[in-house]
Image: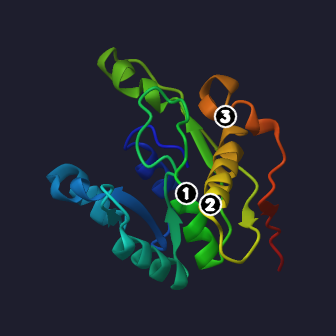
Amino acid sequence: MNHINFLEAPLVAAFVASPKLAALSKKENLNNPFYGYFAWLWNAIPIDRTGVDTDSFNRCLAWIGNDGMLGLAPEGTRSKDGILRQGKAGVAVLSQRAGVPVWPVAHFGTEDFWNNLKAFKRTPICFRVGQPYMIEPAGSMTRTVRQEVADEIMASIARLMPEDYRGPYAQSASCEPRHLRPFILTS
């Protein structure tokens, strides 16, 4: 899911309404009384963004391994203007190691929320959920392939958004992915 501000977390949590949902959150949020409460409420897994955080990575794998769902923003930080930023390769590694599909989720409109709130205006917000994908190949990935997979995941999010929001994925949003295969639910 793309990341604009903290509003997407409660909106997705309300929509999914499952105790199996967790989300990654920068560790600083857990020290803030306001954000910390909501991070705890949403089963947040803290991540140290200053380097590779193997503890958080392993906690994510454990959560998913216990039939949990994990919400994360491949961009790794907020886009205050709503335009997509380059995705980080961690989403590719995590999804591949866990052997689970990636469900692209896009939202837009929340970038205007604070200004609209000050002016007592409504903020139209749109969420879109796309086709889930599995990552291929199943073996180890080079650094280049990991980034290609992350970019394909971000392009799958970009496809769900108006063109003005696609940022560096404006061109690739119309391309077929090389490393992602549609995940088909079977009963």
Depth order, front residue of 162/176: 176
Tell me which residue sits at (33%, 55%) in the image.
49
Residue 146, disc: 2
Amino acid type, residue under disc 1 in the picture: Ala
Can residue 129 be seen in this snapshot?
A: no
Q: Are marks 1 and 2 in contact (CB under 8 Å)?
A: yes
Can residue 145 be seen in this snapshot?
A: yes
Q: How is the image coloured?
A: rainbow
Screen quadrant of the C terminus: bottom right
Looking at the image, residue 102 lies above or below residue 20: above
Q: Secondary structure at mark 1?
A: loop
Q: How far is disc 1 from disc 2 in space, using C-alphas?
A: 5 Å
Q: Earlier in the sequence, mark 3 or mark 1?
A: 1
Depth order, front residue of 80/97: 97
Tell me which residue sits at (22%, 54%) in the image.
28
Disc 1: which residue: 89
Q: Earlier in the sequence, mark 1 or mark 2?
A: 1
Q: Secondary structure at mark 3?
A: loop
Q: Secondary structure at mark 2?
A: helix
Residue reaching furthest to the top: 119
* Number of the front mark, 3 or 1: 1
Amino acid type, residue under disc 2 in the picture: Arg
Position of residue 126 measured from the top left corner of the image (x, y, whole percent): 59, 35
Position of residue 7 measured from the top left corner of the image (x, y, whole percent): 40, 42
Residue 36 horizontal side relative to residue 42, left or right = left
Residue 98, disc: none
Amino acid type, residue under disc 3 in the picture: Met
Residue 97, picture quadrant: bottom right
Position of residue 68 measured from the top left corner of the image (x, y, whole percent): 52, 76
Disc 3: which residue: 161
Q: How far is disc 3 from disc 2 in space, using C-alphas?
A: 23 Å
